[in-house]
Image (cartoon, rainbow, N blue to C red):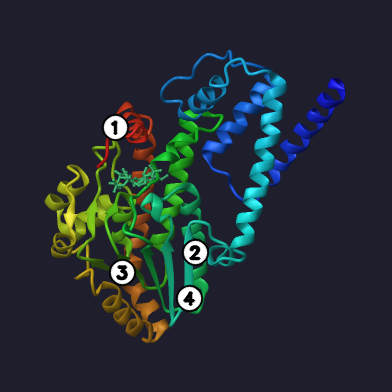
Amino acid sequence: MNRAAMTASQKDFENAMNQVKLLKKDPGNEVKLKLYALYKQATEGPCNMPKPGVFDLINKAKWDAWNTLGSLPKETARQNYVDLVSSLSSSLESSSQVEPGTDRKSTGYETLMVTSEDGITKITLNRPAKKNAINVEMYHEIMRALKAASKDDSSITVLTGNGDYYSSGNDLTNFTDIPPGGVEEKAKNSAILLREFVGCFIDFPKPLIAVVNGPAVGISVTILGLFDAVYASDRATFHTPFSHLGQSPEGCSSYTFLKIMGPAKATEMLVFGKKLTAGEACAQGLVTAVFPDSTFQKEVWTRLKAFAKLPPNAMRISKEVIRNREKEKLHAVNAEECSVLQERWLSDECMNAVVNFLSRKSKL
Ligand SMILES: CCCCC/C=C/C(=O)SCCNC(=O)CCNC(=O)[C@H](O)C(C)(C)COP(=O)(O)OP(=O)(O)OC[C@H]1O[C@@H](n2cnc3c(N)ncnc32)[C@H](O)[C@@H]1OP(=O)(O)O
């Protein structure tokens, strides 16, 4: 009897492991850690591995989850794993039944909303609960959306944010997903991703407009120098706290900001991390126009719809004439900024700043 139950449980365990691979929705980090811990306990018994170092955030979280299970018997861990997967499968299935074919699914983007209407392709950063922080998936999706927009039949392209923030910049948890090659490989991959991401903005062929609906931080600010117009709500702020984060400027801002506002003002922002109000950013040339938050959407979209009626080829060619002679320079600046950052990401200053944010010791 006992033996039959154990055999059945082992089979269920294997089925459950397969079911996890087939889950359509990500169950979230907390659940994934529980699954990991139960799997390790069920297959290897109690955790007797040395505790990973403080910077090895992912392995430390895994170790903590496993270690918490103490001396839980292997069979119980196996059963708990099976129960957790079964509850997970039914809850994820039922939630997808409640919202069949939502907008996000139909557009094929997880972190963005992309619409095309009235000659305008609108790309909306859509992680409002995380202040539209740009995670790795969002970097890839923005590049995909820009490539699609460059070829669609819209005249202009707009980037904006959903919720109270435009974007809080790079998602600092991007730094916690360390590949087998360690932090050096992570820094190298991030530099490659960043270079490709910024390159898409440098090369974007149509008028590109930022509708800055709220505060903007880090890379969401620096790339504004590559936009053709920037409209801001008077609630928006512009903040590039690179020194606070042990990092250095990107998005070609080491070149564009100097041209836009001059070296003294650019240094205040990029080196000393001075946060600008929308009015200040407009006075310094980073922002095209500022509108009261209460009428922001109405005024901006009226203006954009009028722009989108202009002859698209003329706009595209005018942008080419204005921007093309700078392109080579911008790509060179982008490459240099990424290689400097690759080193910075490995510095104690940067690692401490990320750990402080993740352990909620510091906010901007
Ligand atoms: C691979 C390419 C790299 C490119 C290099 C790019 C560099 C940069 O962009 S540097 C700038 C990085 N950004 C930051 O340092 C901002 C960090 N965030 C904050 O300081 C604050 O969250 C805030 C001031 C933006 C907002 O504060 P508050 O209004 O108090 O809201 P919360 O802190 O409670 O945020 C809500 C929720 O969102 C999460 N979150 C916000 N920003 C980020 C972020 N940048 N990365 C990761 N997560 C972020 C925050 O953790 C909260 O999450 P929960 O605790 O789960 O609710």
Q: Residues within 10 Å of mark 1 (few under 14, many from 20)?
A: few
Residue located beneath label 3 in the image: 228
Please tell me which residue is depicted at 44% across the width and 41% down the height of the picture. 174
Residue located beneath label 2 in the image: 145
Which callout, 4 or 1, points at the residue further toward the start of the chain?
Answer: 4
Give the residue type at disc 3. Asp
User: What quarter of the picture does the C terminus occupy?
Assistant: top left
Please tell me which residue is depicted at 64% across the width and 24% down the height of the picture. 40
Q: CA distance from mark 4 to mark 1?
A: 41 Å
Residue located beneath label 1 in the image: 361
Q: CA distance from mark 2 to mark 4?
A: 11 Å
Tell me whether circle 2 and circle 4 mark residues in contact (CB < 8 Å): no
The answer to which quarter of the image holds residue 318 is bottom left
Give the residue type at disc 1. Lys
Which SS class for mark 1? Answer: loop
Which SS class for mark 2? Answer: helix
Mark whose residue sits in front, 2 or 4:
4
Q: In the image, is residue 263 above or below residue 281? A: above
Say the numbered circle drawn on residue 116: 4
Horizontal side of residue 175 vs 22, given as left or right: left
Give the residue type at disc 2. Ala
Which callout, 2 or 3, points at the residue further toward the start of the chain?
Answer: 2
Q: CA distance from mark 1 to mark 3?
A: 37 Å
